Amino acid sequence: MFARVSEADFSQQALYDELCLNNQASQSGAVVTFTGRVRDYNAEGAIDGIELEYYPGMTESALQQLLAQATTRFGLTNAGIVHRVGRLPNQAQIVWVGTCAAHRQDAFSAASYIMDMLKQSVPIWKKEWAGDTSTWVAAKGTDNEAAMRWLTDDKDD
């Protein structure tokens, strides 16, 4: 498992290769990856990018805990998260999640679980920029609902 926070951009292919190289290949029939990017809009209209801040040490620890939870819950054979911080322009890559499991549904469910829980349990804060003005972004109700579904639902799908 690996969890990183970085200002630098990442290569999806390099992360996939790392995930598979350190995977229990004989036990994995599925690899799922997700890449999140900066949108050029919000509910009010166009934006010029975002800025992400984090709490060094605490953020990486929270990411590792999230991976451990997903590994236990979905029987993963490997998983990884890379989350960028700093000022990012529109269309820039923000986050990458990769999961390996014996079966595809477990890999898909784990990737969804990680993304839903990441937004609620990992100390990363977002500002949106429009021109010279920035606005801190509050947690969305839909993000809270997505996380709560995993906490209250007995089903993993």
Image (spheres, grey):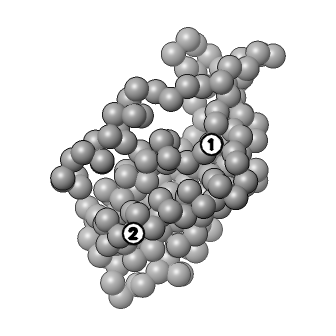
Q: Position of residue 117 (x, y in %)?
A: 43, 47
Question: Between 21 and 137, which is closer to the camera in this rendering?
Answer: 137
Give the percent coordinates (x, y) of residue 29: 31, 76
Secondary structure of the residue carrying tag 2 is: helix
Q: Position of residue 154 (x, y in %)?
A: 18, 53
> Is residue 131 positioned above or below 75 on the image?
above
Rate crowding at label 1 as few (under 14), some (14 to 19) or many (20 or more) other CA atoms within 10 Å: some
Contact between labelled residues 2 and 1, with CB atoms less than 8 Å apart? no
Q: Is residue 42 above or below residue 52?
A: above
Residue with the mark numbered 1? 124
Amino acid type assigned to the residue bearing label 2 in the image: Thr
Left or right relative to 60: residue 141: left
- Left/right placement of residue 73 relative to residue 138 reads left
Q: Residue at x 53, y 81 (%)?
A: 22
The residue where tag 2 is placed is 71
Instruction: Give the residue furthest to the bottom.
Output: 26
Residue at x-position 54% and y-position 64%: 64
Give how far apart the Cα atoms at labels 1 and 2 are.
22 Å
Residue at far left of view: 154
- Describe residue 1's horizontal placement relative to residue 108 as left or right: right
Residue appearing at x 65%, y 55% in the figure: 58
Q: In this orientation, does residue 10 appear?
A: no
Residue found 30% across the figure and 48% down from its top: 150
Residue 110 location, quadrant: bottom left
Find numbered disc 1 in the image and state the secondary structure of the residue it sits on: strand
Q: Earlier in the sequence, mark 1 or mark 2?
A: 2
Seen from the viewer's position, the closer of residues 137 and 7 is 137
- Vertical arrangement, residue 151 with respect to residue 70, above or below: above
Q: Nearer the viewer, residue 120 or 77?
A: 120
Examine the image and state in which quarter residue 131 appears.
top right
In this orientation, does residue 23 appear?
yes
Q: What type is the residue that disc 1 sits on?
A: Ile
